[in-house]
Image: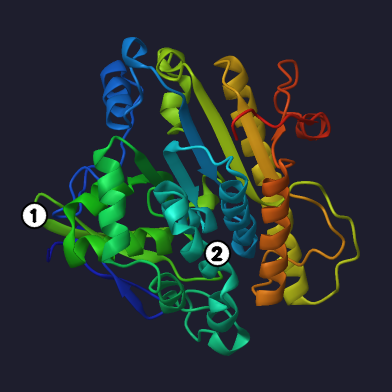
Amino acid sequence: MADENHSRSRTNGLVRLPAPTNGDAEIPGFEGVRLTVEEAEESLKSAADSLSLPKVLLQREDFNILAISGGAAGGAFGAGVLVGLTAAGQRPDFAIVTGVSTGALIAPFAFLGPDWDDKLRDAYTGGYAAKLLSLGGLSGNFGGVFRSEQLERLIDPFLKEDMLEAVAARHAQGRRLLVATTDLDSQRTVIWNMGEIASVGGPAALSLFRDVLVASASLPGLFPPKRIAVEREGVVYEEMHVDGGVATPLFVMPEAMLRWKNLRHRLQRSRIYVIVNTVLDQAPRTTPNNVPAILIRAFDTMLRFSYRQAISMTTNFCAAHRLPLSIASIQADPTQGSMMSFDTVSMQRTFDAAFERAASGELWTTPTADPARPAFLGALMSRWSAAPPSGG
């Protein structure tokens, strides 16, 4: 560890270990908790098996997949959607749940089902974000506007041993909970199998489970990166992870699997659901000429474009595999606050609106793929047609 390639590096007075030079480093005691999918047929088949994707001859029931996007305070929308679907008796039983950023914070509740609705509602409307993500909590370091501890304190009231045990139990039944982070050093998306982490159990598993959720929600500039220690051949390294949305706004499957020719057979009788925790339509208005307003407006614009592109890709994937796709997003509203507005009144309003739409059966839309212009996002979004799926 004393050689030149493994000396500690210093940036702005902060000390960290160097990153591993390739992707085969592991977290001691948690080997295999990160889903590595390569283009080779055997790797793809192994990944499908680890995800419990059904084999053709054994598939008897619908296989529902839920992808939850980022969106900061817009996560109150996703929470309201899930609780509203429960109230309407229309909530699907999800076999796979994926989450990115605030979607990663929602994902464990979505994965565990309606019994956790009260805690999910409290997490997004109980005032925790308003208290912890206020101007009084600004950080003085170079990592971000807020301290990493503030995200941890946001999660801690809900992430206890009982949640870890419940996730492990669902995982043992063949259900899968996946969360994405972005590894800044390797510039790649890392997909974490949260059920595998939970299955290890104990304080170390609880700590890593929390670290991954915090990392996935650590928007650069707003929160400092999460540093995760790994080992290779007995040498300790350190990876730097940030918001999963930097590289992957939302995901249904690992990217390599989307091109697998046998995926269609594994996904027969499957239905894809996507919850987008932001407004997708443009909202033209005059931007105040000050730094905070410009930054917030730029962040909001980035979200809308990146999620529209991700939805375009998802739509074309589902069309190619003949999979029913249902998407819910926040409706445009002139009174809608910024996705960075963590005040409780705004988040409660977003939650209530989502709850009402879900409970009334007016939630889902089905976008139409455009094979001739798969990248033309404006046409895609304008051609959505309301089509609530049967049974949820």
> In the image, what residue type sits under mark 1?
Gly
Residue plotted at (19% across, 64% down) = 204
Can residue 389 be spotted in the picture? yes
Q: Is residue 288 left or right of residue 227?
A: right
Of residue 323 and residue 185, the one placed in the foreground of this image is 323
The color scheme shown is rainbow
Q: CA distance from mark 2 to mark 1?
A: 44 Å
Q: Is residue 18 visible?
A: no
Name the residue rendered at 8%, 54% in the picture: 234
- In the picture of the structure, the residue carrying the numbered disc 1 is 234
Q: Is residue 325 left or right of residue 239?
A: right
Residue at the (60%, 35%) spot, across then down: 392
- Residue 122 to residue 6: above or below: below
Query: Could you tell which of marks 2 and 1 lies nearer the N-terminus?
Result: 2
Total marks placed:
2
Percent x, y of residue 305: 71, 45
Q: Is 5 placed above or below 178 here?
A: below
Q: Secondary structure at mark 1?
A: loop
Q: Label 2 belongs to which residue?
A: 121
Inspect the image, locate mark 2, and give the three-letter code of the amino acid beneath it: Arg
Q: Name the secondary structure under disc 2.
A: helix
Q: Which quadrant of the structure image shows residue 51?
A: top left
Residue 249 in picture, x, y percent from top left: 57, 46
Q: Is residue 389 above or below residue 199?
A: above
- Given residues 92 and 159, the one toward you in this image is 92
Q: Nearer the viewer, mark 2 or mark 1?
A: 2
Q: Where in the figure is residue 112, as x and y percent of width and height?
A: 40, 50
Farthest residue to the left: give it: 234
